Image (cartoon, grey):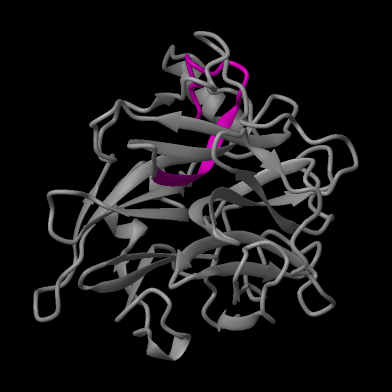
Amino acid sequence: MRSGYPFAHNVLGFSDPSVALVDGRWTMFLGGMAPTFRTNIYEFELPCGADPTSPAWSPSRSSAASARRVRPIVRQPARGTWNRCTHSVCYVRGMDSGVEVERIYHAGRAVETVLHRRAPYRIGYLERRPGCDWVSAQAPIPLHSAALPSVLEPKVEFHDGLWHMRFLTIPVGLPSDDTDHFRIMHTVSRTGRDDWSEPVEWFGADDGFFDSVVAEDEHGAVMVTTRDSDLEGRTGGPAQGVWLSTAAHASAPRSAWSDPVRVFAPEEAGIEWVDNGMCAPSAQWIEGHQRRLSVFFAGAPRDRSWPRLTLRALRARRTPPVPSPVYFTVRRLDIDIPVAGDRGPGLTADS
């Protein structure tokens, strides 16, 4: 992000990856921030036959506006709409009234730029039905309430005939250095539209988690959990990293999941792009490797001051970074998940 993108001169940076196999090709949906500081959703893909560990990601055929520009998958929502700025994306395929649909759940706010932090977040989705283009839902999902004033970070899976969503709730206008009020809630739906059950707490404020995503195979289910990446340089904040939980199946209730175990510590990794943690995980099993989970993140580097980075680059006679209020890097962490009785997880970072 700091050096810009040769294929996307019209986007300052990308974050919040959601990776899935779409029509036989690995595809990544991302939140992207334009020079106007408005955010929207963009699509990248790998060549046919490549697995998600390949570095050959490029704008999808429909997203490449030119050799140096990309277009979002939907037009920027109009001024004043609930999803004027859109991010925190999660792609999922499931059934709605007997029809298979694709959806990208996301957070949105009725603000002109992402720098505005006082408006509440809402959760909605884009939908694509067979033979159709992506269409944005006209209204947010009715998840917010007096008890849940701001809702974001939707992580949605379709299991056993139901749509399962875990999402983050925070007070409106929460200071960016206050993580004491983060709670992850869980709700289910038959249609994934407006019939969601009453949300129940999955992780409480004492846990301090920000995101959780589930992957399932024949051996059971694994939940990958992260905290909010530290974009503000907080001191004394909660530990960053990756936590894993396991259960017999993905739709298991909270009580059936093991306690989260921290398996990756950024402060010990020595990898610059996750020095200040990571968020927005997306997890996929890698074919040909027994229980190897490829987890994509938005990583936060420790040094994020544009003036300081610019001065350092000029002194070294390098091109300064693109101006931005925040810096993210989309990267991947491969985790070998043990089968029952095996040793603990093995880790490989895409650095």
Residue found farthest to the top = 67
Residue drawn at x 49%, y 8% is 67
Residue found farthest to the right = 80
Q: Position of residue 74 (x, y in %)?
A: 67, 32
Residue drawn at x 24%, y 32% is 50
Q: In the rendered view, tell whether residue 42 sits above or below residue 62.
A: below
Q: Which picture quadrant has residue 272?
A: top left
Quarter of the picture containing the C terminus is: top left
Q: Position of residue 229 (x, y in %)?
A: 52, 55
Q: Is residue 197 visible?
A: yes
Write the start and end of the magenta stretch as one range.
Answer: 1-20
Q: Nearer the viewer, residue 37 or 137?
A: 137
Residue found farthest to the bottom = 255
In the rendered view, does 87 fall on the left or right side of 215? right
Task: Assess whether residue 41 is covered by the magenta stretch.
Answer: no
Q: In the rendered view, tell whether residue 35 sits above or below residue 271.
A: above
Q: Is residue 237 visible?
A: no
Magenta stretch: dominant SS?
loop
Tally of numbered discs? 0
Q: Which picture quadrant has residue 261?
A: bottom left
Q: Nearer the viewer, residue 134 or 346?
A: 134
Residue drawn at x 48%, y 16% is 7
Q: Position of residue 158 (x, y in %)?
A: 47, 64
In the rendered view, does 316 fall on the left or right side of 238? left
Residue drawn at x 37%, y 78% is 260
In the rendered view, does 216 fall on the left or right side of 39? left
